[in-house]
Amino acid sequence: MTHLRLQATEFASSRRVVAHVTGGMDGVLRVVTLLRGRGYRVRDLAVRMHDGVAVSEVHATVELTVPQAELLLARLHRLTAVVDAYSL
């Protein structure tokens, strides 16, 4: 009898990702364009923008494995509009 051993990193699950961005709607659109252009499966997307505040927040729930989540965070950090990005 053969037992397959799968690592937890091989299974995609819903992960919450938060990106703090500058540049108002342009910064937000850069994050959304990255998610769409790379084909990420976004389950939920919310944006918090307030008049007079320099930094906006993009909250996304995305189907990701652990390595995919790490790659997404690295890609977000490379965007000039992103001040910070992390997974909850």
Image (spheres, rainbow, N blue to C red):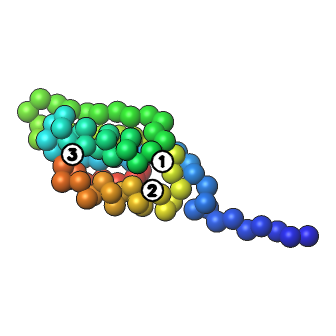
Residue 21, numbered circle: 3
Q: Residue furthest front?
A: 37
- The structure residue drawn at horizontal position 11% and vertical position 37%, both measured from the top left corner, is 53
- The structure residue drawn at horizontal position 29% and vertical position 33%, both measured from the top left corner, is 47
Q: Residue furthest right?
A: 1
Instruction: Check disc 3 and give the amino acid type.
Output: Val
- The structure residue drawn at horizontal position 27% and vertical position 58%, both measured from the top left corner, is 77
Tag 1–tag 2 contact (CB < 8 Å): yes
Q: Please name the residue that numbered disc 2 is placed on.
A: 69
Which residue occupies the foreground of this view, 45 or 48? Answer: 45
Is residue 12 visible in the rendered image? The answer is: yes
The answer to whether 73 is drawn above or below residue 48 in the figure is below
Q: Position of residue 76 (x, y in %)?
A: 30, 54
Which residue occupies the foreground of this view, 88 or 84? Answer: 84
Q: Please name the residue that numbered disc 1 is placed on.
A: 15
Q: Of the residues under marks 2 and 3, which one precedes in the sequence?
A: 3
Is residue 57 visible in the rendered image? The answer is: no
Instruction: Check disc 2 and give the amino acid type.
Output: Ala
Q: Secondary structure at mark 1?
A: strand
Q: Position of residue 58 (x, y in %)?
A: 30, 40
Q: Residue furthest left?
A: 52
The answer to whether 64 is drawn above or below residue 51 in the figure is below
Q: State the CA–CA distance, disc 1 to disc 2.
A: 8 Å
- The structure residue drawn at horizontal position 19% and vertical position 34%, both measured from the top left corner, is 25
Q: Position of residue 12 (x, y in %)?
A: 57, 51
The quarter in which the N terminus is drawn is bottom right
Image side of residue 55 versus residue 7, left or right: left
Q: Secondary structure at mark 3?
A: strand
Instruction: Check disc 1 and give the amino acid type.
Output: Arg
